Amino acid sequence: MSGGTLAAVTFEIVRNRLLAVTEEMRVTLQSVSGSPTVTEASDFFTGLYVNGGEFATMGLQVTHEAPAVGALIRHLEAHRPVADGDMFIANDPYIGALHQNDVQMAVPIHWGEDRVAWAGVMAHETDVGGMEFASWCPAATEVYQEGLRIPAVKLVDRGVLREDVLEMIVAASRLPAALELDIRAFVATLNVARARVVELIGSYGRGTVGEVMAWMIDTTEHDTEDRLAALPDATVHVRDFLEHDGHEDTLHAVDLMATKRGRRLLLDFSGSSPQARGFINATRSGLHGGVTGALIPTLGFGLRWNAGLLRPVTITAPDGLICTAVHPAPVGAATVETIWTVTNVVQRALNLLAGGSEAFASRSQGVSSGTMATFNLGGVSQFGERFGLHLLDPLGGGSGGFAERDGVDAGGPVAVPVPAIADVESNEQVSPLFYLYRRLAPETGGPGRHRGGNSAEIAVTLRGVESGDAIVMTHGAEVPNSVGLFGGWPGTTVRQRFSTAEERATGRPPRPLGPKPGRIPMVPGDVFSVTWQGGGGWGDPLDREPTSVADDVRRDLLSVRTAAEVYGVVLVEGQVDTVATARHREELRRARLAAATAPPPAGAEDADASLRYALGDHLRVVGAGGKVTVRTSAGAVLSRAAAGWRQGAAALSVDPGARGISLHPELAMTAYYCPVSGAQLAVDVHRRDEEPGDDLVFDIGERVPGP
Amino acid sequence: MATTWIDVGTDVGGTFTDLWVRASDDRQAVVKVPTTPDIVSGLFEGLGGCAGALGLSLEELLGRVRRFGHGTTVGLNALLTGAGASVALVTTSGFRDTIEIGRLKRQVTGLTEMEITDVTNRGRRPPIVGRERVLEVVERVDRDGVVVVPLEERAMEQVVDALAGLDVDAVAVCTLWSVANPVHERMLAEAIAERRPGLFVCMSHEVARTVGEYARASTTVANALLGPVMGRYMEALEGRLRGAGLGAPLHVMTSLGGMAGSELVTREPVAALLSGPAACVMASHQVGRRAGRRQLLSIDVGGTSFDVGMVVDDAALTRRELSIGGVDIHRPSVDVATIGAGGGSVARVRDGVLVVGPESAGAVPGPACYGRGGQQPTVTDADLVLGTLVTGQLASGGLALSRELAAQAIEREVAGPLGMSLMDAAWGIRKVLDSNMAGVLRRVTIERGHDPRQFLLLANGGMGPTHAWALCADLGIPQFLVAPTATVQSAVGAGTLDLRASAERTCYARSGPGAPLDDHAQARLDAELSAALEAALAKLPAARTAAWSCRCFVAVRYRGQAHALDVAIGSGFGPPRPCDRELLARFEDEYEVLFGAGSQFKRAGFEVLSVRADVLVRLKGGVPSGALTAHRHLEEVGERTVVFDDPSRPLECPVWSATVPPPGRVLEGPCLVAYPGQTLVVPPGAVGAADDDGNVLVTLDATAGASLVGTAESAVA
């Protein structure tokens, strides 16, 4: 080999080998693990890290978890002596985990005296102790009540597994065998990673392997910066909510002010609510996880996923907020509550920016599956054994509508790149669950030119046992988190219902459950049913291709009535009546304007109408310098600055009940229309006592563009 | 010498149709022709070529055929292009969307890792059957097979009436827990067959007897979709062959790696989806077994894909599920790992790094050296520049390869942008491709706990014999074997393999920590094993009159796991055996081999999920043996300059021409051996030796320390 000139070849080979090692880690973990979260839903993380904790590779797993083991590695480097052959275990959300269910392990990879790299693994464990089964404890007010907390403990000491430590850890769990099987799977996974990377160093040298890992991160950083540079310079202000802290039905906001300048992105969460009393909080590591969960899938398409995606991004927020809770705030439900909501706002901000850019407008998308309603079932199984089931079916919400096509039905969250749920038969085989249905729920996707994906829904009872305990909780039963883009509607809110066997016998309709009913004792014949959130729609539903509306009707995903009411499409025996549809759509647009409050006309157009940015189908930012206006496709001038277009649009407070959306008492929804054409420009969810502000303001006109 | 019988093997691929014939008088021939849209006419052109090579007319050839084996991608193509029949699915009320939802994983099934990073790629493929063609029927069976909601006569009538409005050619019936009790599926299928006799109807408990309604439904619908297509194709093929004088039975290659009667493939076309790759692995298994080896790696390097199969302890590895064109299929198949890498893989520079594949230049325009307008450099171009390639594809029709065009493309697209010399760039292209292929080999060996140094590599496909030496060096595999017909190894398989069938039964049982299965579970296991064996035998009518043997497996896992291991009862094929008491202990042993010492976890307890029976009926024939000694040929035809490990130091080496090398001949490396359709590269320090069967066994220089495994082990220790 002739050395330096062939570095390009060596790098590609070493990179592919590192990716293969990461893949092998995944296979090992999934094969050995006994947790459905790992084996089915890929709710776990495997990766290789450079010194300092940045990840150089990761599997295609739950992206929230990407930065978490890195935080543990930094903690170990700062506070613990680390020797070749050691392995460490941890799950402390105040150090690096998202909540205590996320058990993490890390192993240093040495070459001689040098530590060259780290390998890390992490997965959601069904139970790590605490007040309630599954360690989700709605009644908790302190982290001490939420199960075993392991800051960073040596589990393998120079190659020897410390059985005493392992025993202590699994003794804290209601499902010790499952936890032990997984921890052994972690050890196997890290053994594989360490051996393979050492082999690689043996072949290519310590320097080369280290260089390639650093180069991989640098390359992705550079690509990410290029991508940011292609987005317009702008400020985005978006807010999402979550309700019920486990104690009371309170409303909490996650507020994001995102500033994109040049090749950098600043994410400021300072406007978020203070930390809550109950378990919905996230620690700062949770905030980083939530941000990563949106950044990677939204900006990282076609790139090698590693810490380079995070480098151009700065995250800021003071301590003590719902997304930066301080010790000893409870955080047991962080992943499905605040972290999930953080992902929603970052996803939305990035999609607004993409929508305003020429390069990426075709990729913009409404919010996908803005919630994860959890259902855990515990008790004694049909085999007479203590069991716990963490049901993954709730991943089956709808994904957001895309600029170029509909969202995917039961597409699930974007933060999970390879989602999967178990077969009905598999769940029935190993647990006492018995399904009455698992199907798509029609009309749950947010209406839009491209509608959001419809959610799935299930109804379950028990069979073959005397009783069981369900733990049921969600956010998004009274908040439409899966909001749309550019005039698309949000998807429906979560509907959780329950009937006892007696109630069903008397024909009573199922009782709606609130967002967090907590523990529900169940016996065979009792039925729990749930419909998750549909995805957010993209664009005005009155612009939807009428034949697509007819297709949805043909597929029983839309009623003829909704086709007419929401989409303005008139069907005659399943076929589109083109003339009647055009007429009906025009009537609906006029009806919008008749009901809405319209401001006085903003006057004549300016001469310079050169297009700067298009936002969806109907909003245009035109002009230059101090003469910027925001207009609609029909020529109405809404604003004579980059900001404030909502003040110039026709506004209508909308009652979303008919669209399957329940609202928390403190929330309201407002739709904005073009005052000339009646085209729907935005559908906003906001606090009842506040007017929606600007969500996207470009750096033009009165502002000076950043560096 | 009179030709008393002829064995024919054929394999229809997407681009080429491969044929192999062997006559009783010791002659064999390989032919490659372009695949035609109707397939049959291309096949007959190839058969004409075979007849010509043996000096016979087509009718003379077919009249003397003793066995005729056929592998085809008809089913595969229909699935990939959606050109199958119009299908409806009948299923349990409440579960209409099983396939739409597809366990959520359907939306990314079949995507590459890079495609998965892009969320806009999700759910682009429509479901194999849309919800508007799924009919729900009120009925329900539970996990124990107990009927919870009976299937009413009226409900069946409604379904049959609804079918009339759907304009379908085929119906798949898949109800929940039909594997525990198929009574409702049978009632539905009978009702449909009675009222709509023209339809192709299949039931999930027959097509894919497994727990898990998504894979079962998906497989059953795929089967229904292919049923009418495959039926028509088999009828046309058999009709023309019989018309042209074929008297021998027509056998079809299946994904299981054995032959089946054409009637089985007509009824269960999903059985034959991956016939080509399976045939290659199983043909390699025969070749390797004759060479006395039990641990084999079979590689197939073609133009666009690199396939790897494995034989461990004299048994080819199989898998339960595969994904084709975004459709998840549950069907036991020879386990073949595939990546997009081959002679046609395109090389380019991205982010300052040399990337090779997975895009391929295909047959048109093909590599730059073909002179058909291809502008992008490929691996074939690199091989030509490096001197390791002497012959092109047989089907290129003796096309002269242009080294100049190859060099220009590499200069322009790779060497220039990277500031490298032409030779460095060509060497780099080969090195990256070889490394990607070695990655697959590493995945199937080291990652599964197998030591590659214990394996013999069998190099197949047009490019396999050219690249095998580099793969062996990378993984520390000491020897590789090249058959004289390696370039059409799948066709050889179709012409030589035995009849084979497989059937499954579900059988759920649990045992507590460290405890054996109780007597009740053991008795059920034996009963289900017998039932599986019976079902497998029913798929092979030949077993009624011929001797058969079987091999049975039990799927076991630790309690709570999602993945099970197939644990064999007894070793190899033999008479039926009851399930022994050592089953769980063997599971733990195999588990430890796979996941490392100390990974056993007795405290978890065990779960038994299902059983499977494979049945084998031997056919006459097999790979050409040492008896074939005439018509052998090997001679030195020249010299050329070839780059092996160092692009700055090319070596002069002899070039040999061969058909079947005579036994005992020794080929000292470095040298090249040009066969029809393949070039064997024997690197410096290696020695090739021709065996009685005409294979060349190449032993790499044991003293050259290129083995990563060797270095790695010393590093770990």
Image: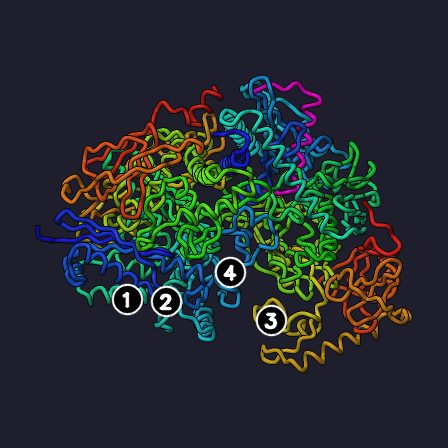
The prevailing secondary structure element of the residues shown in magenta is helix
- Disc 3: host chain: A
Find out whether residue A71 is within the magenta segment.
yes
Tell us which disc is closer to us: 4 or 3.
4
Tell us which disc is closer to us: 4 or 1.
1
Answer with mark 2 or mark 4, whichever residue precedes in sequence.
Answer: 4
Q: Is residue B313 visible?
A: no
Q: Position of residue B227 (x, y in %)?
A: 36, 63
Quadrant of the image occupied by residue B686:
top left
| Residue positioned 57% across, 32% down in the render | A179
Answer with mark 2 or mark 1, whichever residue precedes in sequence.
Answer: 2
The circle drawn on residue A553 is 3
Point out the residue furthest to the front here: B404
Q: Nearer the viewer, residue A690 or B587?
A: A690
Q: Which residue is mark 4?
A: B127
Q: Is residue B455 above or below residue B341?
A: above
In the image, what residue type sits under mark 3? Answer: Val
Q: Are marks 4 and 1 in contact (CB under 8 Å)?
A: no
Q: How is the image coloured?
A: rainbow
Question: Would residue B596 be found to the left or right of residue B333 on screen?
Answer: right
Labels 1 and 3 within one chain: no
What distance separates the C-alpha of mark 2 from that of mark 4? Answer: 20 Å
What distance separates the C-alpha of mark 3 from that of mark 2? Answer: 29 Å
Tell us which disc is closer to us: 2 or 4.
4
Labels 3 and 2 within one chain: no
In the image, what residue type sits under mark 4? Answer: Pro
Q: Which residue is mark 1?
A: B235
Please report the bounds of the magenta region as a residue range.
Answer: A61-84
In the image, what residue type sits under mark 2? Answer: Phe
